[in-house]
Amino acid sequence: MAVKLAVPDPSSLQPVEGVELGFAAAGIRKAGRDDLMLIRLAPGARVAGVFTQNSFAAAPVQVCRRHLSSGSAIRALVVNAGNANCGTGDAGVAAAERSCDAVAALLGCRREEVLPFSTGVILEPLPVERIETALPACVKTLSKNAWGEAAAAIMTTDTVPKAVSVVVTIGGKSVAVTGIAKGVGMLSPNMATMLAYIATDAAVAPALLSQLVRDVADASFNRVTVDGDTSTNDSFVLIATGASGSPEINSQANPEYAVLRSAIESVAVRLAQSIARDGEGATKFIEIQIEGGATVEESLSVARSIANSPLIKTAFFASDPNLGRLLMAIGNAGIARLDVSRVNVWLGDVLVVERGGRAATYREEDGARIMKPEEITVRVDLGRGVVRSVVWTCDFSYDYVKINAEYRT
Amino acid sequence: MAVKLAVPDPSSLQPVEGVELGFAAAGIRKAGRDDLMLIRLAPGARVAGVFTQNSFAAAPVQVCRRHLSSGSAIRALVVNAGNANCGTGDAGVAAAERSCDAVAALLGCRREEVLPFSTGVILEPLPVERIETALPACVKTLSKNAWGEAAAAIMTTDTVPKAVSVVVTIGGKSVAVTGIAKGVGMLSPNMATMLAYIATDAAVAPALLSQLVRDVADASFNRVTVDGDTSTNDSFVLIATGASGSPEINSQANPEYAVLRSAIESVAVRLAQSIARDGEGATKFIEIQIEGGATVEESLSVARSIANSPLIKTAFFASDPNLGRLLMAIGNAGIARLDVSRVNVWLGDVLVVERGGRAATYREEDGARIMKPEEITVRVDLGRGVVRSVVWTCDFSYDYVKINAEYRT
């Protein structure tokens, strides 16, 4: 079902020096399917993350926060699909720590140097013994060329693994940026992806890496919404191993900073867009562009009001240029004193709403033409300022209902 | 499709002295189907209303606000289905005023004494000449016994007309409270119904009536959500004709006030629940009860986060007790410092989540049993205070997608 989204060509996925990935079938999700993924980092790698804002943060999210804030050098990440280890209380935290212990014993590091991640069904106890049993097989497959297999091992209802690479030159050294992500539902603007990992062999100072992971999340994963629901397990981790030998970047003023940030952001945006393209039941990929906003907050609020409206999403599914629903959603964004007579809206290149009403030049057949393709752009000019924002989403189809009604059956 | 919602028995609909209703087919919605409704009020009737908070308030909403704030005695209301007269700019306002002029000419009153309402497709010019043509037929049918026909004439995608009556005694006089409503989609907590009219022949002082319409809306229509979208045309009007001869109520301290408010609120709540029962594609009616909240705002925020979650609504459609999604939605309500270890959740009479985790006594078959019926109650105790709130909603089915994907075809 994914909209213009192919399985990544393994040869396009650039190894990142200092990062090895392993995978195995632990039998947590479905028998015989890879559902366990391990990342081993070389000494000296720096790691920063951002996590869900949901009050019911899952046990592994709680453990990640604790291990990251302990100041330990992170040496490994372990990810299981099929069980979210959420709503599991102290026993869930203990299970997540036990998975870290198992990794630490196999790799020869400390529990606090391991970050655990889980995705899947909520409120079921994590069968951590299956992780312990499968981990040795996972370690055996560790390889710097396993990004594609790693992306597949963390999938739940994803139909396509999501992985992207770019290469840039920093200080005369070739630097790789490679990322993987998973997530197709329970996605909303507040840390949209369920799980995303991006690694680079550039060297980045710890404080700058912590800022960078937040800035990149805001510009990428936080701009995706499938159904407006924020998962309890959302996590995005940025790894900088420094193994390329490129000089350390320690300030935004550093001239190489913009090069690296742009590379990381382009990987993150492409992963984020893949998530919307692979949204549950998606048949259309929709980019919502807001311009003329007075603030970032209000422009994002309008974009999300459009992107999360079930009425608009079903109209996109039907390829129906139902312009009234667009106006309804813009009007619902809660903008104080919005002068609707300054609002213009385009579908693709067609001006459909002009100064708050139907554009004089608009013809229904033009709207219908724009709504047909699998990729559609909605552009709204609020006429209030100069701020622009972009959000990505997908349509709402019979299959969204089917997938979510039958998820556990 | 409506969940336990029958066509109202006409004999149950109590006439309200001073209120006559007429209906006609104007050919705006579908040929040969009543889509125009007129209410004529006796002199001395008092009228108050609350309207959509959407920035794109439709032309008739703008005109209603102007006519009500002009201090004119309202003598008539005219309602068309099939066209929302929204996003239609100055021409739309002129068309709404023209419909008022036509009513005023037929009934012998002034334009400002008429309130116009429209519901239907947005961004299409209102064919006001069809209203003008059909109005004489509408006037001919005026009758105090036409509440059922009036409820049918304002339907759009509603499958069942919605009308409710109660009778109470005030100051020794029998007083009727009768209301009608329409609306099945584009409904959200902020003025949930698209159109609702409640009339009583009690006498209520104007300032008190203005307060009463807001209080009743907050306790009824504002507690319903179908899809989280707020329409551009939502309107709720409360009429007190005083024609019963009961003594005027002019203060909340008046002992008869509680009797009347309770009667009006019970009519409004039943109409509001009918809207959720007839939600687009609804197969289940769901009551979300929040208790233990610290404030009304936070308890409503949790209720709406649950009621608007597509993941939860599809699970209800599937009769799947997917408890994790309930936790996810509670955690997404944006409550600062929610102690999840104090949260308990019941499905019907079954404790499913205890202190933030799966209840020790919970068995999947109990959850499955509770999810089967057409009416389901979710109760959440936040463990933070003593505030209770209730919200009504429906599930999210294939038919929701179908109805909204094919609405204009």
Image (tube, coloured by chain):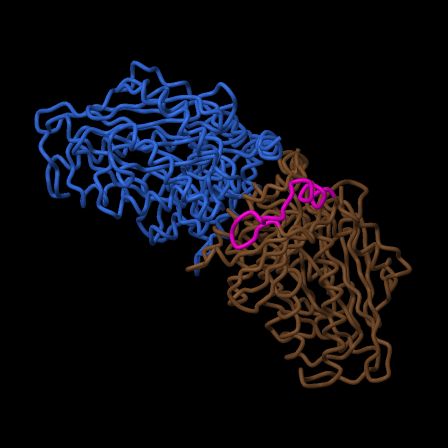
Chain colours: A blue, B brown
Please state the horizontal and vertical placement of residue B407, each as a whole percent of the image.
65, 37
Pick the quarter of the image with the C terminus of chain A: top right
Determine the residue positioned at 38% across, 50% down. A383
Q: Nearer the viewer, residue A270 or B206?
A: A270
Please state the horizontal and vertical placement of residue A135, each as a whole percent of the image.
37, 25
Q: Nearer the viewer, residue A277 or B403?
A: A277
Question: Does A261 appear above or below B326?
Answer: above
Q: Is residue B367 left or right of residue A148?
A: right
Q: Magenta residues?
A: B352-372
Q: Is residue B7 left or right of residue B405?
A: right
Question: Does B312 appear above or below B268?
Answer: above
Determine the residue positioned at 81% across, 68% down. B19
Q: Quadrant of residue B74?
A: bottom right
Q: How many marks?
A: 0
Please state the horizontal and vertical placement of residue A213, each as a whole percent of the image.
27, 41
Please state the horizontal and vertical placement of residue A388, each as a whole percent of the image.
33, 44
Q: Is residue A51 left or right of residue B242?
A: left
Q: Is residue B1 magenta?
A: no
Q: Is residue B354 magenta?
A: yes
Question: Does B350 appear above or below B114?
Answer: above
Q: Quadrant of residue A294?
A: bottom left
Q: Nearer the viewer, residue B91 or A186?
A: A186
Determine the residue positioned at 15% across, 33% down. A203
Q: Is residue B293 left or right of residue A266?
A: right
Q: Nearer the viewer, residue B159 or B34?
A: B159
